[in-house]
Amino acid sequence: MHIREQFRKREVMHGMEKGNKDEQELIQVDKMISMGVLVSGVAHEINNPNNVVMLNSAILREIWEYLLPVLDGIFERNGDFNVGGLVFSEVRTDVPELLSGIERSAKRIRNIVQGLKDFSRLQPSEASEDVNINEVVRNTLFLFKNMIKTSTKRFSVQLGDGLPPVRGNAQKLEQVIVNLIQNACQALPDKEKGVLVSTAYDEKSGHIVVRVEDEGVGIPKELLPRIMDPFFTTKRGKGGTGLGLSVSERIVSEHGGVIDVTSEPGKGSIFKVFLPTNRKKEVATVLVADDDERARSAIAEALREQNYLVREASNGSEACVELGRYRPNVLILDIHMPNMDGVEVCRVIKNTLELSDMEVIVVTGLPDSPKVKAIEEMGFKHILYKPMRLGSLLEMIGMVLEKRRVFEEAGNEEISDSKPTRFGQGY
């Protein structure tokens, strides 16, 4: 429904009196309509150069990956050397991160422009993709970190592990989180008051719950029923339009959810967004065992973003302790580790009846190592070689889990696995 039509319908429903107040709110409507026309033109001008950035960054990544083996060879023969004023050992790590940052930022620009267009048009959300709600929250916090920093010294985030996806539109849901966090920050009387943002899965109802809690001034009881009304705001003098919560409620409703609000003047407010999950999904658990803390953390974080439940171990001994505590669906195991290497861990798994069918993905930077051969001879065939892409890791995990599902549905009949599965370094 057009913004002006929404306003007129709401005006009739509430029997609003004509006067200066109506004129100001109609001006706000016209501003929003004008913004839609303006954004449409600006978006075209922004998207053209941004598309060039996105395409060229992908080409640069391919060039880097093509040159990397050559540069690694020089490093192995001659030791460290300078590249553009930096040593290669640092550049080797930094360049992929810089390219990823460029790609993420370019996509972010594209999404922001599209979000502005959608906001001004108030088009229905297209529920066409599985959305990781934790990623939506992270993106929002990245965008508004400066506003948060200037609003409070006590901002905390608690994101639930292994949340099932929501079927919907990520940019629309991000707009909801933006509005709630902005409102929470603006409600704080000083920087000593805090804001908490959390996500969780309510198994009983099958809903994802996004909670934004502030220690602000609160909302008077008599105003609570009206806070979702279009153009209703207590911040008109501070630039408030009264559209934020109204649009948020519409977006959440289109996703099949609801927004619940509780508030107490002088103590703060709690906004809860309930979003139904597309399906109740068994969350796969993954144990990542690697003595390289940076690599282990990167893998674990990437898997959590894909809704896996992740645990970590810094060496072989810790991995065995974790395996004794719980049974993961997949073990990602580095070969070269202190206090028991990957070969010894595989031997323990092979000789322990309860673990003998454990799905293991072995990670190594030395494809010709005798340890790789020893592990393959024990029957562990899934090998991932460093440097590796996240896509390769996710593909192999998905393949392993799917194979296990087929195996179990077939009544645990033997499935041939004579050939190793190798990803990375030319495989």
Image (spheres, helix red, strand yellow):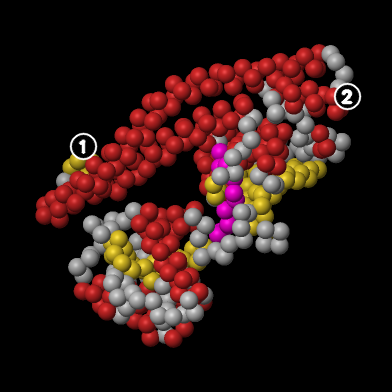
Residue at image position (30%, 48%) is: 93
Question: Is 350 placed above or below 288 here?
Answer: below
The answer to whether residue 76 is left or right of residue 345 is left
Q: Quadrant of residue 9?
A: top right
Q: Amino acid at mark 2?
A: Gly
Question: Is 339 placed above or below 284 here?
Answer: below
Residue 5 spot, x, y in % from top left: 74, 23
| Dot 2 alpha-carbon crowd within 10 angstroms: few under 14, some 14 to 19, many 20 or more | few
The answer to whether residue 258 is left or right of residue 343 is right
Question: Is 278 placed above or below 91 here?
Answer: below
Nearer-the-camera pick, 425 or 127: 127
Q: CA distance from mark 1 to mark 2?
A: 69 Å
Residue 427 spot, x, y in % from top left: 25, 59
Residue at image position (68%, 17%) is: 30
Residue at image position (50%, 60%) is: 308
Q: Which mark is drawn over residue 84?
A: 1
Label 2's element? loop
Which residue in the protein does label 2 denote?
Answer: 15
In magenta stretch: residue 169? yes
